[in-house]
Every structure is written in structure tokens, then in C-alpha cells.
Image (spheres, rainbow, N blue to C red):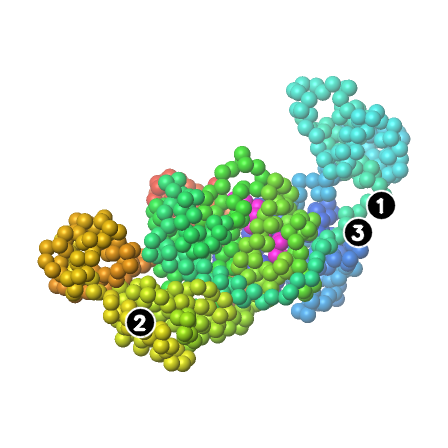
Amino acid sequence: MALLPPALTQILRNRPELAGAPSVDMLERLLDRPELAIPVLLDLDADCHVVSQAIQAAGGATTREALAGLLHDPLDRLGEVLDTMAGHGLITLDSGPGGGGGSSGGSGRGPDGGSDGGGPDGGIVRSRHPAGLWQHPFGLGRPLREFGKTVTAETLKTIVRTFGGQPAGRKADLVRQAEELLADGAAVRARAAGLPAQARALLESMAAGSPVLAGTQFGYGPVPRTQPVQRLADAGFVIRDGWEYELPKEIALALRGDAWKPALTGQPEVPVGPVPESDGVDVALAAIERARALAELAATESVAELKSGGVGVREIRRVAKALGLPEREAVLWLDVVFAADLIGSEQGERLIATTLVDDWLERPAGRRWRALAESWLGLPQAPTHRVVGCCEEHMTPLPPPYEFACEAGRIRRAVLQTLRTLPPGMGAEADKMGEAVAWRTRAMAEAPEASAEFVAAALREAEWLGVVAGGALTTLGRALLDSGDVDGLFPAPVTTVTLQNDLTAVVTGVPSPELAAFLDLAADLESRDRASVWRFSEASVRRALDQGTDAETLLSGLDRFSAKAIPQPLSYLVTDTARRHGTVKVAAAPSVVIADDPAVITELCAAKALRKLGLRRIAPTVALGPLPPGETLRLLRQAGHTPVGVTADGTIQAERPQRRRLPVEPSPDEAGFDAEAAARVMFGGPARPAPGSAEQALQDAAVTGEPIVIVWRRGEHYMDGLEFGPGTVIGYCHDCDDIHRIERAKIKKAHPL
């Protein structure tokens, strides 16, 4: 039975990477590929692993009733686990008689989550991967029947004799005899108890979950009969297959005991403590500001990269100082802002702001925050614990902001899903979450050296983003994981400011982009929270004047944005700074310093603090200096003066900071992935290509990104990154080191690498 729309939508929601499939038929082919399914399964919890192995051990297809009989399920989790696996496209569920015609890809539940007739006592469960995804499900070897030609009649006779039978008949008869004898677990265990101690210990180890032992570890050639593994083979407990020894499934089950069953446990309990509930908005607003400040820094000064790529320690310190943050947190924002495409690398030499920054700044605060949070969620590495995870010698991690293969991302997502299960008002500490996180992802076992630090890094970074507070999900964090709306949690943009006598400006809420731009021009941001504070000073007002703004424009802007009359101290600050602004002018030749008052020129030439300028008076109001105008302006301002630069015709030259932008194409799916829309497109997709055809190989490669060999112009071209245009295939050819655009009609042969 074909996938029905609800089942297809759920699969695409869980596996959006498959949304590029042009048809349902192609999606089915991709779902059937085990190499694509294994990473998906590994990202599911331990109970899903248990059920997956049970289905494989049952031959790839079984009933719900039989599956329930194979498992110990005290918490009645089987239905939920099956729904999860079906929703990820790993199994299909067919309802039993009277079950309402459930789809082969459906969950076996109605739209309200209740059973549709395919409950534990009915319906068929099928794996999409008949060969299975596990090499040894439950650590069990092959059944005797699957050894085929490997097991000789003499070996089978030995097994029958070992367990008290009289061999008779051909191989098939001997297999049946052995199976009947091995069904008596007590007898098998009694025979095992009579083995020598070393052989018995090895047998127990193989039965517990290591069913295959390589004979090569004893050296090449015949294995001495004194070796425990050979003793087990001679006694009929293990079967030799070439250079390997394997414990048959029937013997392992007998040794484990009649009561042994794989268990569905549910998430281990997490020790929790009460914490104040938080919506996370205050911290989220601060996160938005830090991302904006980093993008602004990259636009005006850029961030230098090492020759080998990435930002070095010295530059990280400079960025941290400019942002007023600890170095570790600065690295987080480098990674996150880069992943959000707000900064990018220019030829591997420097990081600069991209053309997407302006659009991001114009979005509502909720959408700006979600872009940052989702970019962080998708990072494979932990920005604040930048190691590969397994061992230092295995791989050298890349410096920020570049991604590298790591288990930290999977652990991060498991940490948040674990927090999602905690009761409201309860939080957990990093060092108490390990067991629960390990149940949710195998990444904890795959990165044993760094797993605890990755958990701590996930909580630390989530705190800085407003996703977590005190070890518990915030309202924002929960909405992020539930794909819910976050815009309504942020205050509406504010268009007015409260100006105070102490020269501060307070905005209660999120300032509108226009108001924020005006305040950033003429004042310095001191804090940004629910109430953001800017401070006006002589230096900040002079900065606005240097950029071409005059006193009248500043005062009119203050009057337009202020909720009340402009305080007198602020008005005096603006007018007094403007009055003194430009009393000293600097022209190029290389530097000509001009003042309205001859006494000012006398003072500048005689000041010890300005000896670097080397000024020489040539007229009552004019002095010459050897330094360039920019350096002269800098030193004069450093000494407390308010000079301006002038052009050749004597007009004041505005010093607007140059903001560079790296061109970046906006994402076509800016509003977020719509699984329902993607499912509708698939159902109207093209006709099914012939199995094994070039078109089928091209479609698969375009969705998965896997390399492909295309035969074109009498040559084989090793290509990847395929995209479909109107009647064409576009991709990078490694053989030609070039981008090829090939007419699809001219491709007669294509196959995966």
C-alpha cells in the first residue's frame, strides 16, 4: 500500500532532508535505503533501538501481538515507539482486520492519537529494510538455519551429541534435532557449567553480546585446541566460519535464561530541583543584540582569519573585547552568526557581514531570535567546547566559525529533549543528566571522552540564547522545540524613548529599527533587556556630527522620538558640542590644520601631548603637519579636541563608517519548512523512472547529495551537488574541475559511485 498524505507529511516533518524527492515513488526508494536510515535510527531513543532489533530478530515482519510477546514492556510504551519509528519512515504499520485500512506508512493511530484497530493485539509491523539495520540484534548470532554451507554435518552431529541427542538423518534433520535440544535452556546451561573455567567465561561473554570472535587474534594457521574458543568449538557451543567463531542464536538465548526479554524502559529518571519559571525573553533580546553587534563589527572592521582558516586566539580576544563579552561566549556568537549567514568568509581571509543582515534586522524580534536559535540547534560542534569528542589524536577541530564532524550536536538536541520531559518549575544539572541523555542518543557512547562536557556546553549555550534558564526550558525554548510561534512572546516594537536628565535614554521594550538606528548613531548602548539604556556623551554626539549630522537634525530627531520634552542637560550637550565641533579643521597636504582662533594654533603647536603631530605654524590660524589627515584627526581627538576633516574646497567632510556586505543568496524557504506543502508537491510529482535507469540515479543523487558518475560526451564524469534546471542537470565535476550543465535527454548512463 502506498503512503497516504498524513503519513507522508509526518515523515517529511521528521526528515526534511528528503523533501527534495520529486515524487512519492522516489521518497519510498530513499526510505528503503539502509545507509540513509541508520543515522535516523541512531538519533532515536534506546527503546526505538530495542524495537528495531526485535523486528529484525523476528525476520523483518511480525504482528504487534508477537512483538509485544518478545518484549518486556512494563510502561506500555510499544505503541508510542512504533508510532515514532513509522513517523521517521523506518517501519510500516498495517492495521489488522477491521482496523480501518491503515496506510502502509501510517502510524496505526487515528487523528486523535487513539488506536485505529492496529493495537498491540493486531496489525502487521514491517521493517523497510529486510536485511536489517543491526549486525547482531540484541548481541545475538545467526540462527542455526542461517549458517547454510558454513556448518558441516559433522559440526551439527557434535552439537546434537553435546546436548544429549543421537544424530540421525541429513543436515536438515540434524538442524531440527539441534533446535529441539537447544530449546531446553536448563539442559544447555547445565552442559555449559561443566566447561573449563576459561572456556566458560568466554562463552558467557559471547552470550552477553559479543557473538563473534575473530580467530586471527590467535595468529594465522590452526588455532591450538588448548585455546578456550577452540574448546568451545570442539564441544559444539560455537561454530567456526572461516577465520571467525560464532555463537548460534539458540545457544545464546538458552544461556541467557528462559525469562530473558529485551526491555522497553522509558527515559531514566532525572534528578530535579525547583527553579523559577522564565520566559527567556530578556536573555533572548540580549542574544539578538550580541548577534547584531558582531555583524556590525564585521561590517565596519571585519574579523581576520588565519591563513589556515578560521579565527585565531588573538582575533577572538579582540572580538570579545569589542563586544564586551568573555572569549568563550564570543566564540558562540561567531559560530551562530556565521551559521545564520549573517557573516561570511571573504576568500578565506576575513569575515564580513553579509547582505542578509539588513533583512534580518528588519524582522520582528521573534523571527530574528528563531533564526539564531535554529542555527545553533543545527551546529554539529559545541562552540564552547570545541573538540571532536572521541580523542585528541583522532581529528583536529577547526577554529571558529567553521563546522566539523562531532557528536556534540546530537547530544545537544538530546539534552533539550530530555529537559522537555521535566515537570514545569523543575530544572536539572548537567552532571545529573548523563544517564537520561545517553538513553536518548548513542552519541554519548560514541564520544565517551567528551560526552559530559558536551552536555554542560549544551546547557551553557542554551542559557546564553534564552532557551534554558536554571536547567529548565524557558517558554521560548519550549516553543522552539515544539515549532510554535515565538513572536507573540516578545514585546511589540517601541517607537518612543524616555530621555532623562542624567543623559540616558530608556526604551521599555524592543526598539523599532528606526529608533535603534538613531540612538546607535548619537549615543552608546549600555544595556539591552526589556528596558534598553543608551547614554549620550560628548564623544557620542561628536561621532554623529562627524558623520555629517548637524545639531538641528539631532534635536529634531530627539523631539520626534521622545515621549516628553528634551531634558535641558541633553539639549545643552548637543548644542555645546556642535558649537565647538569643527573649530579645528584638517585638510590634506599632507595635513593642514586650520583654526578660527590663532590662540588655538599656538596651543596645538606647543602641546607636548601632540608632539607626534609635528605641527609647524605658517600663519596665525594655519599649521602644517607631516602625518596623513586621518592620523592627525585621530591624535587630535585623542587629546580631547573636536576637529573635522575638510575637502579641497573647504567644506566639512562627513566621516561615515564604511559598512561592507558580502553577497549571499537568501534562503528560498525563509518562512520555515512546510511539510504539508512538500507532501502535496510529491503527490503531483513526475512519473516513476525505470528501476536502475539513469534518471532514477540522477533523482537519487540530487536529493541525497551523494556523488554520481555520469557518462556524457563519451567520458565518465564524477559529479556531486546535482541540481535540476529546466531540462538540465547542473553539478560540479571533479574530473574536469568545472561546473557542468548537461541536457538530461543526452544522459544515457548514470550510476552511484
Residue drawn at point x = 69 percent, y = 25 percent: 215
- How far apart are labels 2 and 3 at the CA level? 77 Å
Q: Position of residue 366 (x, y in %)?
A: 50, 67
Q: Where is residue 496 in the image (x, y as percent from the top left)?
A: 42, 77
Q: Is residue 408 magenta?
A: yes
Please give left or right for residue 650 compared with residue 282 in the image: left
Q: Furthest-bottom residue in view?
A: 564
Residue drawn at point x = 43 percent, y = 44 percent: 313
Residue 72: image tag: 3
Is residue 326 visible to the viewer in this orientation of the structure? yes
Q: Is residue 228 magenta?
A: no
- The magenta segment is 405-417
Residue drawn at point x = 85 percent, y = 43 percent: 258
Q: Position of residue 250 (x, y in %)?
A: 79, 38
Instruction: Provide the residue designation for mark 2.
Output: 574
Labels 2 & 1 near each other (Cβ < 8 A): no
Viewer-nearest of discs 2 and 1: 2
Asked which secondary structure carries label 1, the reply is: loop
Q: Which of 404 and 727 is in front in this view?
A: 404
Residue drawn at point x = 36 percent, y = 74 percent: 569
